[in-house]
Image (cartoon, grey):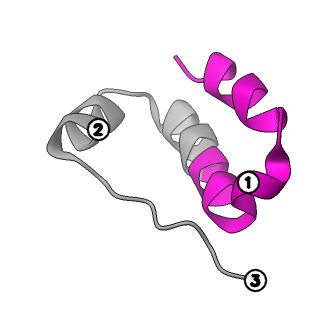
Amino acid sequence: MDMWEVTNTDEYAAWFLQQTEEDQAIIRSRVFLLAEKGPQLGGLTQIISKAVP
């Protein structure tokens, strides 16, 4: 099974660096989950996107 390719933009990197270390760890884990599971997550992607500010 292929992983989704995650592209990092300058805007995202700047926003990410403004987050606390705890939030960065949470965001990193969610990005990894999306990259690894991608479309198999179905509705879970909507839940995750609402949880990340």
Q: Secondary structure at mark 1?
A: helix
Identify the residue at image location x=72%, y=36%. Answer: 45
Question: Would you say the residues marked 3 and 2 are in contact, meaning their CB atoms lie under 8 Å apart?
Answer: no
Q: Residue type at mark 1? A: Pro
Give the residue pinned by disc 3.
1
Crowding at mark 1 (Cα within 10 Å: few <14, some 14-19, many 20+):
few
- Our reading of the magenta stretch's main secondary structure is helix
Q: Tell me which segment is drawn in magenta.
A: 29-53
Question: Would you say the residues marked 1 and 3 are in contact, meaning their CB atoms lie under 8 Å apart?
Answer: no
Q: Quadrant of residue 4?
A: bottom right
Give the residue pinned by disc 2.
12
Q: Residue type at mark 2? A: Tyr
If you read the primary sequence from the N terminus, does the residue marked by circle 2 or circle 1 appear first?
A: 2
Q: Secondary structure at mark 3?
A: loop
| Marker disc for residue 39 | 1
If you read the primary sequence from the N terminus, does the residue marked by circle 1 or circle 3 appear first?
A: 3
